[in-house]
Each structure stands twice: as structure tokens, then as C-alpha cells.
Image: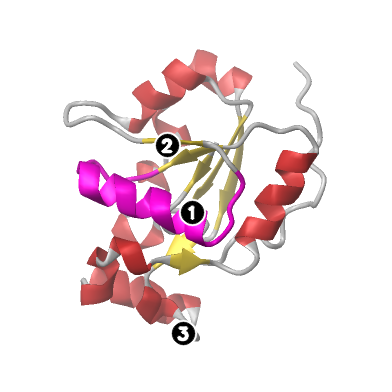
Amino acid sequence: MVFTEGTILYHAAAVNQTRETIVQQVKGKHPSIYEFSSYIPIGEAPRKLTGWSKQGHQILYMTSRTKPSEIQDIKDVLTKHHFPEGELLHRSTHEDYAAIVAKNTPDIIIEDDCESIGGSPLMIYSKLDTDLKTMITSIPVKEFAGIDHLPDKLAEKTN
């Protein structure tokens, strides 16, 4: 499971900006952060995820969007930028991320550190109960830094 916004996608005004500037754009509520249809991949995220998919890993995406039109925007962005197929998971109005993870129980969660919205206490993994944490590997990345630095081959998780 990989989180979309901030982990593999960012707003259009983030292009050619430092990570620190992008964090400030989000904190300052730059208008482009609400233009979900114009989001773009961070680095080579589509290539990295395609490689993992070709190795046999099922990709699940998690979006922070809850409105149907915004969820569709993120789906369209993933398709437009050639991300590998995978279900786009999202919360309902009264659901939290931990509930989505509990329903889907991925082997791995790749998510950013939520720096622009309050830091690691807001990360999905931090909200999981102990039993789920023993079953799921957390791979945190710096917000807006992408996943290019992660290995091209994911190790199989063994319990």
C-alpha cells in the first residue's frame, strides 16, 4: 500500500521547488494543492511502482481525498502518468485510515512523514493497533521526497 498525496504525487506548483518550499506551500495553502487533477508524480514513482508490480507485488494506493470528484481526479492522474494498475482506496466520511488498512491488511505501507500537516503522529502506521503493526512493514519517507531511493526489488516479508 502506498499513500498518494505527498508520497508519490504532489501539486503542480511543487515542480522545481525544494522540499522545504513545497512543505511551506502546503502549510500556506497554496491554491494548486486543491487542483487534484493537475497533480504530478514525484520523481520516478511510476517507474518504481511498475517495477515492483512486475515482480508480482499487488499495488494498493491510498488517497486522502474523500469527495468522489477528487477521488476520480487522483485516479485519473495515476492513469495519465502510467502508474501500474492498483485499487485506489479512500476513506468514507466517518472512517479513518487505520480502518482501511485493517480491511485490506497490506504487507507493506509506504507513506510520507506528514511534515506539512503535523508530523509522524498523523502517519497511518502510528494509528494501527499492535496486532496490525506486527503484520505490516512500515516504510516511511520524507514528505515530497518521493520513493526513488527505495530498492528496485522489494524483499518478501517473512513473519
The reply to whether residue 77 is visible in this rendering is: yes
Mark 3 or mark 2: which is in front?
A: 3
Give the amino acid at mark 3.
Answer: Gln
Question: What amino acid is labelled 2 in the image?
Answer: Ile
Measured along the vertical axis of the image, is residue 154 above or below residue 82? above
The quadrant of the picture occupied by the C terminus is top right
- Is residue 81 located in the magenta-colored stretch of the structure? yes
Q: Is residue 28 above or below residue 54?
A: below
What residue occupies the far bottom of the structure in this picture?
Answer: 16
Q: Amino acid at mark 1?
A: Leu
| Spot occupied by residue 120 in the image (x, y as percentages of width and height) | 42, 48
Magenta segment: does it hold 74? yes
Name the residue beneath numbered marker 2. 124
Tell me where residue 53 appears, x and y as whole percent.
Answer: 71, 40
Q: At numbered mark 1, what does the secondary structure look like: helix, strand or loop?
A: helix
User: Of the numbered discs in the image, which one, if any, rests on residue 78?
Assistant: 1
Report the residue at 30% width, 45% height from top: 71
Place of residue 66 in the rendered image (x, y in percent of width and height, measured from the top left) = 23, 41
Q: Secondary structure at mark 3?
A: loop
